[in-house]
Amino acid sequence: MKTEKSVSIVYEQLIRPFLLRISGNDPEKLHQVFLSLLHHLGEREGLVRTIETVLTYSDSTLEQNIFGLKFRNPIGIGAGFDKNAVGVAILGVGFEEIGTITPLFQKGFQPPRIWYLPEDKALINKMGFPNNGTEATVIQLAKIKKSFVPVGINIGKGINTPIEEAVGDYLYCLEKLYPFGDFFVVNVSCPHMPGLFKLREKEYFDDLVCSLIEKIREITGQTGLPEKPLLVKISPDDSRRELNELLDTCLEYHIDGIIAVNTTLSREGLSISTNKEGGMSGKPLFEKTVNTVRYVNEYVQEEIPIIGVGGIFDAKDAYEVLKAGASLIQTYTGYIYHIYNPFYFYQINKGIKELMDRDGIKNLSDLRK
């Protein structure tokens, strides 16, 4: 593909060196610069459509309808990439998840709070849900024209909110952001947020899920808006007993989807020791992702769609997670390690299609049979 090669050369030789130079090789600043670039591109509708067309790999065999939404391909950007919805999904992805959004603005933990471990293609972060808050996000989302793809909104509790009052934070975020999201993700699994793990205990989790479902019904009854999917993001660090209890609640309340998995406190798989605190993502997490997706899929007996995330770097990784039972895939750290290559998502989707052809698979859903 001549266009792919030409754009890649321009990016590799001009844009990427420029981004690295103005960010001073600081990972968090580099990310913000890239998002700012996406934001400015997104303000030019004609340019957006051109970029979107060039960067999207299209094939009907990759299209799916999952929890009532149409996905043109299975590869999405995970939460944390675009915390404040300043960018737009013009990178050829099948969907995007923004956030985590909390009720009020919060800075998160003091930088530095992102550390790369390139020897292992891993990343450790202790961000602390930095975001502009719900009201600012509503204003930002109201400015954005309808996205090409489904947009999920990841919601969480404020860093200083006591666990006993956490449900109120989630309800507030859901109500204010409801008109702007295609689906919503309940984040109870970020490993470095103080006390958040308590929300995965049955007493708290049942109350949270029940309250959110009731709030959705209340909103739809008052506004006429459709009921939107509610998903739960799970931890790779829970024991099987803890995970089973959580999945039982998801089944009981007919949760629409499960995202497996969040970052991990484990340092298993690293070739070097580190004292950096926070959640680890990247290649060392991949085996846990595959195993957790497979286990969850078997436990829920395919009643709840799964989005697989964690350590997915290329088409081969994505294909393995899809075969384990995921309906959709998210990547984040893998994209960062490819230095925001504009054809990253195009290449993964193209690779999945080639693997499907190799195996005689006609549709993505057939991988899960």
Image (tube, helix red, strand yellow):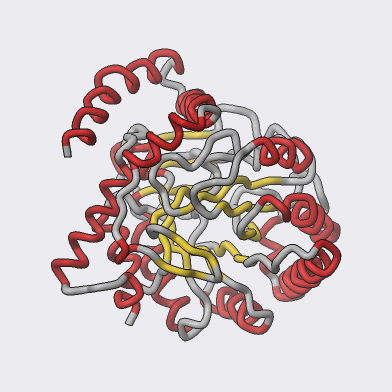
Q: With respect to residue 258, does 137 lie above or below?
A: above
- Image location of residue 288, percent across then percent down: 39, 63
Give the camera-side residue of 348 and 129. 348
The quarter in which the C terminus is drawn is bottom left
Quarter assignment of residue 183: bottom right
**Position of 278 relative to 94 (above/below):** above
Could you say which quadrant of the image residue 72 lies in?
bottom left
In the image, farthest residue toward the left:
358
| Left or right: residue 261 compared with residue 214 | left
* 39 sits left or right of 47 in the view: right
Q: How many marks?
A: 0
**Quarter of the figure that contains the N terminus:** top left
x and y percentages locating residue 51 in the rendered image:
38, 35
- Identify which residue, 251 or 65, lies in the foreground: 65
Residue at 41% across, 69% down = 326
Inspect this view and state whether residue 273 appears.
no
- Residue 126 image offset from top left, x and y in percent: 57, 40
Q: Residue at x 39, y 14 (%)?
A: 21
From this viewpoint, is residue 69 visible? yes
Name the residue at the front extreme: 46
What is the x, y in percent for residue 7?
26, 29
Could you say which quadrant of the image residue 139 lies in? Answer: top right
